[in-house]
Amino acid sequence: MKQESELKLQAYLDGELSRWQARKVAAWLANDQQAKALLNELTIAKTALAAGEPEVKLPESREFYWSKIQRQIQTVEMPQPRPVPAFLVAWRRLLAPLAGVALILFLTVFSFQMYDAGEDSRHHLAVVENLSEHTGAYSFRSQSEKMFVVWVYDRSEETDAESDPAEDQVDQ
């Protein structure tokens, strides 16, 4: 017997089939002895299982019982926050602005030291990177004037200037 047929017999026994399907299975049971035997075994197993289960009666209604369980779960899941001591709140109110002021002072002092290196030029290295192949750049740095200049030019003019002397040599 196929598994689908066995499942249909189980559904028939449990009362899960529509009237039309139940009549069809009843007609099938009248003609098939193997299906009748399986239905008999399933009926015996169902009664044995039902007799072996103890029925538990609750003193409260079902809804009240489950609402008590739900309340207990909610109280366990949400721990009560501990109160923060007043001195910590006061310190937090004082330290947050002080930390901001200290950060601003640090950055100010660091920026002055970065630009005031004196005679030591190792701290003032600058890299000018040109990612375009159509432009070129020259850079100039003056320590005494504390100045850095970058001159950007079009390379097509450079190639035109280089090609002109070659044309002059050909013309001669």
Image (spheres, helix red, strand yellow):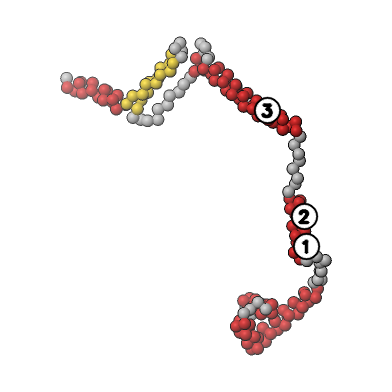
Residue type at tag 1: Tyr
Of pointers 3 and 1, the one earlier in the residue sequence: 1
Q: Quadrant of the C terminus?
A: top left
| Number of marks in picture | 3
Q: Quadrant of the N terminus?
A: bottom right
Which residue position is annotated with label 1?
Answer: 65
Which residue position is annotated with label 3?
Answer: 95
Q: Residue furthest bottom?
A: 31
Image position, residue 2 (x, y; %): 62, 78
Q: Which label is found at residue 46?
A: none
Mark 1 burial class by Cα count in 10 Å: few <14, some 14-19, many 20+: few
Residue type at tag 2: Gln
Which residue position is annotated with label 2?
Answer: 72
Q: CA distance from mark 3 to mark 1?
A: 51 Å
Q: CA distance from mark 1 to mark 2?
A: 11 Å
Residue type at tag 3: Leu
29 vs 143, left or right, is: right
Q: Which quadrant of the structure image shows residue 129?
A: top left
Q: Residue at x 56, y 20 (%)?
A: 108
SS under mark 1: helix
Of pointers 1 and 2, the one earlier in the residue sequence: 1
Image position, residue 47 (x, y; %): 77, 78
